Amino acid sequence: VLDIRKLYGQAGVFTYDPGFTSTAACDSAITFIDGDQGILTHRGYPIEQLATQSRFLEVAYLLLYGELPTPKQLTDFETLVTRHTMIHEQMQYFFRGFRRDAHPMATMVGVVGALSAFYHDSTDINDPQHREVASIRLIAKMPTIAAMAYKYSIGQPFVYPRNDLDYAANFLHMCFAVPAEPYHVDPIIARAMDRIFTLHADHEQNASTSTVRLASSSGANPFACIAAGIACLWGPAHGGANQACLEMLREIGTVERIPEYIAKAKDKSDPFRLMGFGHRVYKNFDPRAKIMQQTADEVLALLGIENNPTLQVAKELERIALQDEYFIEKKLYPNVDFYSGIILEAIGFPTSMFTPIFALARTVGWISQWKEQLADPQLKIGRPRQLYMGESLRDYVSIDKR
Ligand code: ACO
């Protein structure tokens, strides 16, 4: 009998790498991470400098085009993005087709995929002009779509973009303005929002970015590829961790209960993990987590809620975990999701909006990686191999003999 499993390896070198822990699927010039030292750079610039000195759309330009913009380039880019913030009026019907209590991520997966039906004049991936227009459309419309998904989920009327506001302030306006009530965007809160966007802009070949690249490798249109990225990001091991983390911190509730949760996280018979802890690449502090913690301190002080119990639980949990043998040995440190939820909650977002906000910011990274991939003359369809462990060759048995 032919054992088909033995056919493996006969056609050349074959590596088996579940979870791609040590396999590079592409080369890229966008983002660099040194996980042992806790270094993150975009196009060579350290994330600490970009998060504190730059603005999200400036970082978006850097990711997309490779260099920091001149003042004129930045103004032109901002104007271009601003001009595309509206979505087709007819798309409102798409939102209205969802259950009113749908998770905004579920709505976003559908609506972003549907952009390909509304903007099919920019889906020819072989046309550089189409690629450019699709990129700008996605970056510009994602805040509108995320805000509409939120408004729909809470039963409030959609709020149209205000193009006199900057990217982050406009998003806050679309989420929190209600008819007949004046809404003023606090510039310091808008700055914190902008910083959160910047900290999530790109992170090289994580699960959702790899999903975008894999979808794109077959020639799929840009809107479909980004919808695939959103779907992947939603999982609690990835972007969904920010929602799961805040829910965990609230469940812990008081610092006295922390040891109980640390013990649960260490118990191998319990599937519980400390959300917002650990990372595939960082075996040291995630540099974004440090900036996020500082931002949480600033925003909560500004809002006069420094004594926020969730922040206290988070800080104490971090302190205890970092002294614990288990976390030291496995090199588990807080990641970007550990403090972001505390800031977003203080700004006024419900937990269900945390991952959509991540998705809107990461769209810039997904698009930059998508463009880089399409410009690669060596581009091949992504096609991982497998190690077949099933039955060997056998004969079909007719149903009356089974
Ligand atoms: N709590 C407790 N133990 C953990 C945690 C955690 N948060 N993270 C990893 N471990 C343990 C694992 O149980 C495993 O232990 P073992 O060696 O005894 O089996 C070991 O550390 C290695 O963990 P893996 O899951 O193999 O590591 P991997 O690189 O595959 O996973 C991941 C990384 C998914 C981020 C993981 O650390 C995790 O689940 N963290 C919690 C979820 C989270 O915060 N995700 C956000 C990541 S950042 C982002 O996507 C934006």
Image (cartoon, helix red, strand yellow):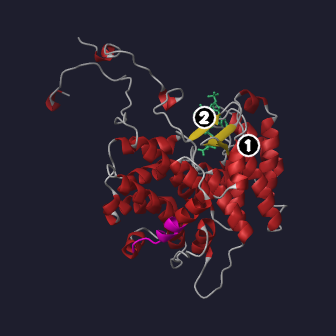
**Residue 130 image offset from top left, x and y in percent:** 36, 57
Q: Earlier in the sequence, mark 1 or mark 2?
A: 1
Label 1 to label 2: alpha-carbon separation: 22 Å
- Which one is in front, 316 or 180? 180
Amino acid type, label 1: Tyr
Is 266 on the left or on the right of 254, as rendered? left
- Quadrant where the C terminus sits is top left
- Quadrant where the N terminus sits is top left
- Which one is in front, 284 or 157? 284
Image mark for residue 261: 1
- Which segment did they paint magenta? 79-88
**Residue 138 image offset from top left, x and y in percent:** 46, 60
Q: Is residue 87 magenta?
A: yes
Q: Residue at 53% of width from left, 55% of height from top?
A: 359
Vertical order, 245 against 329 (above or below):
below
State the SS at label 1.
helix
- Which one is in front, 126 or 204? 126
Vertical order, 289 against 388 (above or below):
below
Q: Quadrant of residue 253?
A: bottom right
Q: Residue at 68% of width from left, 41% of height from top?
A: 277
Image mark for residue 280: 2
Can residue 34 be seen here? The reply is yes
Amino acid type, label 2: Arg
**Quarter of the picture for ligand 1?**
top right
The label nearer to you, 1 versus 2, is 2
